[in-house]
Image (cartoon, rainbow, N blue to C red):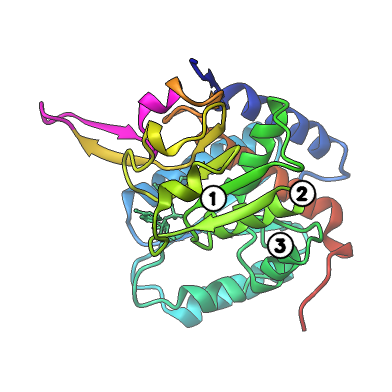
Amino acid sequence: MTAQLLAGAPAAAALLAATAERARALSRPPGLALVRVGDDPASASYVRGKDRRAREAGLRSTVYALPEETSQTELLSLLADLNAAPDVDGILVQLPLPPHLDAAAVLRAVDPAKDVDGFHPCNVGELWSGRPGLTPCTPAGVMALLAHYGIPVAGRRAAVVGRSLIVGRPMAALLLAADATVTLAHRQTPDLGAVTREAELLVVAAGQPHLITPEMVRPGAVVVDVGINRVVDGSGAAHLTGDVHPAVAGVASALTPVPGGVGPMTVAALLANTVAAAERRSALPVCP
Ligand code: NAD
């Protein structure tokens, strides 16, 4: 068997086009505030990409690039201003933050109705309650990718490898909400292969290059590789690789490539969240 490659570009383009159309239907362009602190080049590059995509989709995007020495009080003060600004519908704080800042407290300070990353405990609770809300972008992008390719989720046995707050846990919650029977595996799971071989739908977000080998995959399974790992080959050249060994394409019925699979879906899902926040902000539940 050679797996169908689930390319992210066409699915992301479709989601971006639908998002741009929804943005045009609003009385004013949805506003997105992108906040980053410090000089991390990867964070700066991610924020630039999000800003460019947002503008292309017709959103009004503003980048707040704060210096490394920004204090917790200064950052919380900016967030309070953005929470109160009527023309800001979505707020994203780019992670990681410099170590002197309390990231959990910062994420809690974002108005849940504007929390387009879906990391506020209020939105995490909504997600695990099975109620629609703002959901973390990468897992939301995976669900959009599966929908784009017509891959059914309901009633299937699914396994998620990785339990981070950003990918693994919300991924499991979204699959559960879509009526899959879900197992969530992690670093302490004994016999990972026994878990993954059960799965008709396998999502891997461990950050371990080629963790999943062909013997660990059920023949005909759909495999989603969220991992993005920078590896250096024998010649010293760096390249990106996933958590799934390429030979899994000989066992799976469908597989996302790395790069070019889940990656493009994350930004598209962020913009869809921002438009959803603009559409529904006043109707969302608010934590006390
Ligand atoms: P993380 O380090 O926060 O979490 C990794 C999880 O994998 C942990 O729960 C850990 O228990 C589990 N894990 C690690 N090694 C394992 C093993 N050998 N067996 C079983 N479980 C194991 O990472 P993260 O932020 O969730 O990211 C995971 C991967 O996804 C990374 O490669 C990251 O770069 C990538 N990522 C991609 C996107 C995207 O847009 N495509 C977005 C976010 C993260």
The magenta segment is 233-249
Seen from the viewer's position, the closer of residues 155 and 150 is 155
Kind of residue indicated by mark 2: Asp
Numbered label attached to residue 114: 3
Residue 2 at x, y percent in the picture: 48, 15
Residue 152 at x, y percent in the picture: 73, 33
Q: Is residue 79 left or right of residue 192?
A: right
In this view of the protein, can residue 34 be seen by the observer?
A: no
Is 282 in the magenta?
A: no
Q: Return the residue at label 2.
A: 179
Q: What's the residue at 38%, 40% (across, down)?
A: 212
Answer with mark 1 or mark 3, whichever residue precedes in sequence.
3
Q: Return the residue at label 1.
A: 160
Seen from the viewer's position, the closer of residues 110 and 226 is 226
Answer with mark 2 or mark 3, whichever residue precedes in sequence.
3
Kind of residue indicated by mark 1: Val
